[in-house]
Image (tube, helix red, strand yellow):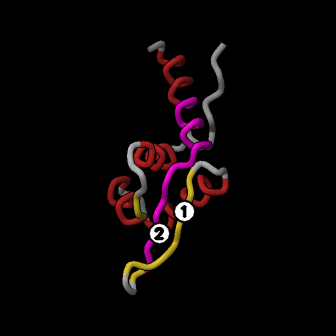
Amino acid sequence: MFKELNPLLHSELRLAIMSILISVEEADFVYIKEQTKATAGNLSVQIDKLSNAGYISVVKGFSGKKPRTTCSITTEGKVAFEEYVENLKEYLKI
């Protein structure tokens, strides 16, 4: 019997965000937007969902006079991502 894939991470854009953040200490909104090719509005909504779940932390501030949003993965997010990958491997029989 297969374990259910985490529906929060099963979204293409949320999975892409988590995949970026799992390998870096932090990433700013502009970098994530460039990497995922998502619209700013859609990316913002998906970042909020991941943040509300406790999977990422979001820090809003300024770089000079420009607003800057920085995201990083939480311990809970790392665990959820690793479980998702393991469950996916079971589906793929890897």
Residue 30 x, y percent position in the rendering = 37, 66
Residue at left 49%, top 54%? 72
Q: Circle 2 — which element? A: strand
Q: Which residues are magenta?
A: 67-84
Does the CB distance between marks 1 and 2 fall below 8 Å?
A: yes
Residue 42 x, y percent position in the rendering = 50, 61
Residue 58 x, y percent position in the rendering = 54, 62
Which residue is label 2 attached to?
A: 69
* Quadrant holding the C terminus: top left
Residue at left 41%, top 51%? 25
Amino acid of disc 2: Thr
Amino acid of disc 1: Val
Which residue is label 1 attached to?
A: 58
Residue 32 or 74: which is nearer the viewer?
A: 74
Residue 6 x, y percent position in the rendering = 62, 35
Find the distance from the CA under tag 1 to the CA under tag 2.
Answer: 7 Å
Which label sits on residue 72? none
Q: Circle 1 — which element? A: strand
Q: Please state if 87 lies on the left or on the right of 17 as rendered.
A: right
Residue count near mark 2 (Cα–Cα under 10 Å), binned few <14, some 14–19, many ≥20? some
Residue at left 42%, top 64%? 29
Residue 72 or 41: which is nearer the viewer?
A: 72
Residue count near mark 1 (Cα–Cα under 10 Å), binned few <14, some 14–19, many ≥20? some
Residue at left 66%, top 13%? 1
Residue 44, above or below 74? below
Place residue 2 in its image quadrant. Answer: top right
